[in-house]
Amino acid sequence: MTCASCANRIERKLNKLDGVRASVNYATEAATVRFDPARVGTDRLLETVAAAGYSAALPAPTAAEEDPVAADPEAGLRQRLLVSAALALPVLLLSMVPALQFDDWQWLALTLASPVAVWGAWPFHRAAVLNARHGASTMDTLVSIGITAAYLWSVWALFLGDAGTTGMTMAFQLLPERGTGGDELYLEVASAVTVFLLAGRYAEARAKRRSGAALTALLELGARDAAVLRDGTEHRVPIDQLVVGDRFVVRPGEKVATDGVVVSGTSAVDLSMLTGESVPVEVTAGDRVTGATVNVGGRLVVEATRVGDATTLAQLGRLVTAAQSGKAPVQRLADRVSAVFVPVVLVIALGTLLGWLLTTGDVTAALTAAVAVLVIACPCALGLATPTALLVGTGRGAQLGVLIKGPEVLESTRRVDTVLLDKTGTVTTGQMSLVDVAGHPDTLRLAAAVEAGSEHPIARAIVAAASGPLPPVEVFASQAGIGVSGTVEGRQVVVGGREELPVALADVAEAAEAAGRTAVRVAWDGEVRGVLVVADTVKPSSAAAIRRLRALGLSPVLVTGDNAGAAAAVARAVGLDGDEVVAGVLPAGKVDVVRRLQAEGRVVAMVGDGVNDAPALAQADLGLAMGSGTDVAIEASDLTLVRADLDAAVDAVRLSRRTLAVIRGNLFWAFAYNVALVPLAALGFLNPVLAGLAMAASSVLVVANSLRLRGFRSAVEAG
């Protein structure tokens, strides 16, 4: 598919089949088809796509192992671009610099330009013919006509006109003279247009490929193999050989192979890659665990309850796919206008040819004017309008920590009015830290000494907060779900536990838990003597960034899987009201929140970083992923924020809106140039050479306008 109209055409063909409902997405190059197998088979679906002039294949099974070194899908296009550019440069120099025009130079120019105009421009010619067979016209139609007109006129001038004579030079004249044209060549026009537009097509293809890897990134989070227990011994088997009922071992630091139930052992499991939550969950015999989560504590033996496509990870993958497929294909402005523009230009060119023939009878003058119309209308500036602005905009964005994935994203930033903010890792740091110490002065020192033997994130936060050397620990012990203990300086210290708190410390613990924080008891010699409060801390830039989002006309909403207390505490810290918080949301529930807001007529942006955010990022009208997050969240998003703070989200929206404005300005000038100069060419006031120069000038204007984006400043710099 070369444009959104291709997707629409395939969709219409499929929907004509009996009992078929199809949705074709141009951005993902995928079709979601619902059909009755009793009335139509998959072979018929594939044949229908082929009959429309395209190719399709059924998706490979999700468990299939892919080659880690995938073939470069842009290799052919890149080779076509490089070879065409190498051949076009000398043609351009020979045609535009008279001092370089030696005897019979024009035949060398023809030799070099022919592969460019035919082989280099073949993607445009092929797409134009395909569109013509279906009664449609797009940017490819315009490009193909312009290149073909310039090249065939040059061939005619060389073989049948006077351009092939020895000593011929290119002379530029503001107005075509009656009877001239047979000695004019436009090979540089055909060559330069081809190279310019191949470069734009290549840049677009690279961005498009990167945006389609969400499902692959998601599935790669899972374990590759598992240590299955058979006859009392461990056997390493590939993950796709696991069956329900298998028991497998998960050591500290390893990923849980698949969904299951803990049979023996106790540990803490890090769910952050699936839920985004920063605090690992304690598990013991009888507790359920999810595949792809990480065991951060002791040894576990797990019995598989769901494998393959039935796992939570696979279901999450299907959510991402469904959300992506549900997006309507975006019809680009240039393609919409060219559908009318091409027939109009063809009619004007034909009218020009007939008009000159009827009024003057001069065939050369008639052909010169008609070719001038086709050349002046060749949409080089239209083809450059989007890629050049994207190139400069994304380059500046990279400097500011923002990655824009494609032109479809920009329109969403202009229309978006609501932004959903995931709490953990987006508004907060996603890392536990000590925020309060209450009770005995030795509470932190003794607790840190004992916790130094634990790898639990809460333990790491306590140890990191302690200053100075820690006393040695004897008889260290860990009880899953309860805490750790050890002998320090002759005292039996217990960190965690469930002992009753004194009144003063109970008030501290209750206040901490009401605020969504974690209160850790510290006891020694049989009595609780202190409380340590740890929490996921708010990023310093979050509050100011939320104010800037509001200034852009966006309504922020905090959404999290945490409890209401933790969510409310974070909301207060960043200046959000109670009605701007949605707490206790499961991964699939975030998609529901997005859909509910969209059903209310809102245009929704989503900012997140975890795998649990990926379906919502894909469902949202605009997805923004924190670069500190998981690969699948980044791939499912429309914008990636390399800087892990919300100020990058502000810059992303501002830069995208500015880039969209530049693209629209480029398109306006490109069309205005055609509207102004096509009539002049038709009336004989422009010869094709000058038309080629004018076309090049319009391209320079478009590029210069795009370069203004290099001066874009971040919201923090702009104040």
Image (cartoon, rainbow, N blue to C red):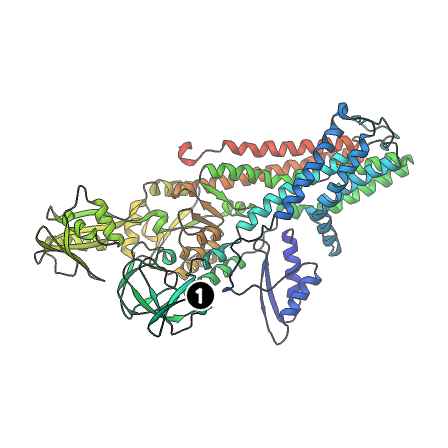
Q: Amino acid at mark 1?
A: Pro
Q: Residue furthest bottom?
A: 38
Residue 236 found in image quarter: bottom left
Query: In this image, 457 relative to 325: left or right?
Result: left
Quarter of the image where the C terminus is located: top left
Residue 680 rendering spot, x and y as whole percentages: 77, 33
Q: Residue furthest top?
A: 99
Residue 625 rendering spot, x and y as whole percentages: 44, 49
Q: Residue furthest right?
A: 361
- Other-residue count near label 1 (Cα within 10 Å), few / some / many at <14 / 14–19 / ≥20: some
Q: Residue at x 49, y 57 (%)?
A: 216
Query: In this image, 133 relative to 282: left or right?
Result: right
Residue 525 in view, yes or no? yes
Query: In this image, 191 relative to 530: left or right?
Result: right
Q: Name the foreground residue: 64 vs 350.
A: 64
Q: As displayed, is residue 236 above or below residue 369? A: below
Q: Residue at x 53, y 38 (%)?
A: 393
Residue 704 found in image quarter: top right
SS of the residue under disc 1: strand
Residue 603 in view, yes or no? no
Q: Name the foreground residue: 315 vs 517.
A: 315
**Residue of label 1:** 238
Residue 652 rendering spot, x and y as whole percentages: 46, 42
Quarter of the image where the N terminus is located: bottom right
Residue 34 found in image quarter: bottom right
Q: Residue at x 12, y 60 (%)?
A: 500
